[in-house]
Image (tube, helix red, strand yellow):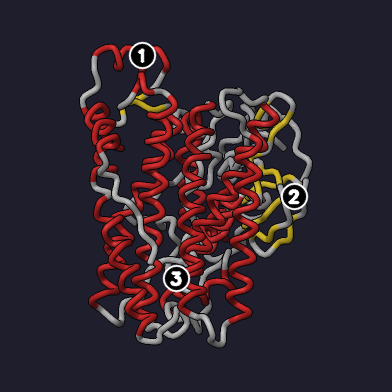
Amino acid sequence: MAIFPFPNGMGIQMTTQSAEHPAFLTRMRALIAGEVSADTLESYRNAGGAAYKLFIDAEQRRNELADAGKTPWTMTAAERINMVSTWVAFALQTLGDAFLEATYEADPGTVGFVPAITARQADLFYGEVANWLAFAAKAETDDQFLLPVHMPFDLPAFVEVDPCPTSHLLAMLAAASKIVDHAGIAVADCARSAKGGDHDREIATLKGRMAAITASHDYAQSMHRDGVVPSNETHERIEATIKTVIVDAFRIGQIAAMPELAAHASSPVAASSPIGQLAALARPMLPLPGQPGFDRFCLTDPHCVSHLTRDPKAGPAIDYLWSHDPSPQKTLAIQEEILAALVRGDIDYGKGSTGRIGHYYCCPWSAIYHVNRPVVIGGQELQSGQEFTYDVSADISADVSAEEIADGGLFKRNILVSRFSSTSRTDYCDGGKNNDGCGGKD
């Protein structure tokens, strides 16, 4: 049985108390360092006992099922959903806690405050925990419950900032160590429960993937030397490797709980799987137009949204795009593939000699991406070293009027591969009414 120590030791309690009631000097140091309050994150951390208790209860239940002769392959669908939901909740809570605690350890003088990037990252992890606790509870009491999301569940995106603070890199290294340790335990538990069964090949594959994750983790950890500030190049290599490690460990923990996900590690589950019938019909995880939480700029390069929201022509152009999209589900599904590829490290934001190279000049002003390793997005094979953007438009030519599009005419969703160059032009793609010059790449 895997045992996880609850964060209730004296040292952690003292840190929590300091974080909740920072002294005046602590506040001043944080202000000088440009750090932000961790009040909300501390509330999430204090609520983490529910995720840890659920994890220990699930491990006990897994042992009971194993004693009864059940394996992850022979458990009921509801039992597997309970296990995988527990893992996701536990892993996300662990990652959020690790980012917070590592930051405090790196700078004890500002406990209760963290760099803005760390605050945003931890909040993304913590923000999903409650949903997965609810899924686990539902699966425990309802044997017909099906997960309403694509699986394997993609880790929330990593927050990007250039340059990345060294303290945030240290937090990523600490978080990776914890998630890799627990993923290894999950794989070992899966292998032990199926020992002597009919799944030796699957177990060997699972162990091999875990070994590769561990090797990458150890390599990244060895590249970092305590007390030495890494060069920019070394920092970027460590950062890229450790992000991939965290994503892969998060995913393999899900596969250990629900082995049928192994064949669908970067796509929705198949219709024949226990949750496939719902997942095949499930709406994109990005909210659709008209649904709560929909962001009309969700296709836009996040680094230029604040600028575009102040552009009086941009909002109407985006609204024009969505109002003429005959299938927003398809549009958002491709965007989800892009976001998932970013999380996995398959792609990254395009960079030039002076930093990020910006966004595409046409509405919805998508980011320019660089392909790190071969990947398929939107049905198109992309090769290492290529640059691409997501070109979406309801204004594909001067010969296509808005009326024709609104009546079901052509609408473009294109993974555009090119070598992009600077331009002063901005195209609002709203039928030619608002096209002028103000930046982007073409």
Spatial CA distance of label 2 from label 3 is 38 Å
Q: Earlier in the sequence, mark 2 or mark 3?
A: 3
Q: Which residue is mark 1?
A: 29
> Depth-wise, is mark 2 or mark 3 nearer the camera?
3
Going by the numbered disc 3, the residue's amino acid type is Ala
Q: Residue sitting at 57 percent across and 57 percent down? A: 337
Going by the numbered disc 2, the residue's amino acid type is Val
Q: Residue sitting at 45 percent across and 38 percent down? A: 315
Q: Quadrant of the C terminus?
A: top right
Spatial CA distance of label 3 from label 1 is 44 Å
| 76 on left or right of 238 | left
Res 125 seen here: yes
Q: Quadrant of the N terminus?
A: bottom left
Q: Earlier in the sequence, mark 3 or mark 1?
A: 1
Q: Which residue is mark 2?
A: 417
Mark 2: few, some, or many residues within 10 Å (few <14, many ≥20)? some
Going by the numbered disc 1, the residue's amino acid type is Arg
Residue 257 has which mark? 3
Q: Position of residue 53 (x, y in %)?
A: 26, 58
Label pair 3/1, CB-CB below 8 angstroms: no
Q: Earlier in the sequence, mark 1 or mark 2?
A: 1
SS at circle 3:
helix
Mark 1: few, some, or many residues within 10 Å (few <14, many ≥20)? some
Q: Position of residue 246 (x, y in %)?
A: 53, 50
Label pair 2/3, CB-CB below 8 angstroms: no
The quarter of the displayed image where residue 365 is located: top right
